[in-house]
Image (cartoon, helix red, strand yellow):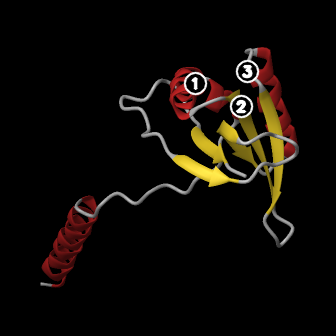
Amino acid sequence: MDNSFKNIWWILLLIAAGGIILFLSFRPNQPQVDQGVVLKDILHQAPQAQPMPPMVIETSPVSGHEAGFTIQVYSFQDKNRAEAALQTLTNSGYKAFLITSALGNNRVWYRVRVGGIPDEAAAHKMLDDIRKNYSSGFIVQTVN
């Protein structure tokens, strides 16, 4: 009698474990925590099936850059990564430059942008070109 009681507990334990596994398999997948992106991963990403929709952000002229359109390709908190991305874009023939943005609490972002774009149509064309090679970027409209 004592041995059959142990067998029933094992069976109940296995049924409970199966129920827990079944319950967990139906839960929606939780997003993974972003661990950051290495520059070489950004530069060698596979093209996305659907391109990101263009987005235009308005800002004021910074560091002597004229009003018009620019494309922000990257934004890093690590200055070395930003400078490496800047060099890559410059070597590819883009008029790239770096903007430093202090956000308070000693947080600084280094934004890598491509400029010298006269109008919105040309900005969208250049954005498409940049996304083919770098899989990122959005348009920034600089107004006075």
Q: Which residue is drawn at 29% across and 61% down?
A: 28
Which numbered dot is residue 137? Answer: none
Q: Does residue 132 lie above or below 119 as drawn?
A: above
Amino acid under label 1? Met
Tell me the quadrant of the picture where the N terminus can be found. Answer: bottom left
Crowding at label 2, few (<14), some or many (≥20) Cα neighbours within 10 Å?
Answer: many
Left/right of residue 141 with respect to residue 100 in the rendered view: left
Does the CB distance between marks 2 and 3 fall below 8 Å? yes
Q: Is mark 2 on a helix, strand or loop?
A: strand
Amino acid under label 3? Tyr
Q: Residue at x 19, y 69 (%)?
A: 19
Left/right of residue 114 with respect to residue 120 in the rendered view: right
Which numbered dot is residue 94? Answer: 3
Residue at mark 3 to residue at mark 1: CA–CA distance: 10 Å
Q: Position of residue 49 (x, y in %)?
A: 36, 28
- The residue lying toward the viewer, choosing from 69 and 130, is 69
Quadrant in which residue 52 is drawn? top left
Question: Pointer 1: what residue?
Answer: 126
Q: Position of residue 17 (x, y in %)?
A: 26, 68
Q: What element carries label 1?
A: helix
Q: Does residue 89 lie above or below 53 as drawn?
A: above
Question: Pointer 2: what residue?
Answer: 114
Residue at mark 1 to residue at mark 2: CA–CA distance: 9 Å
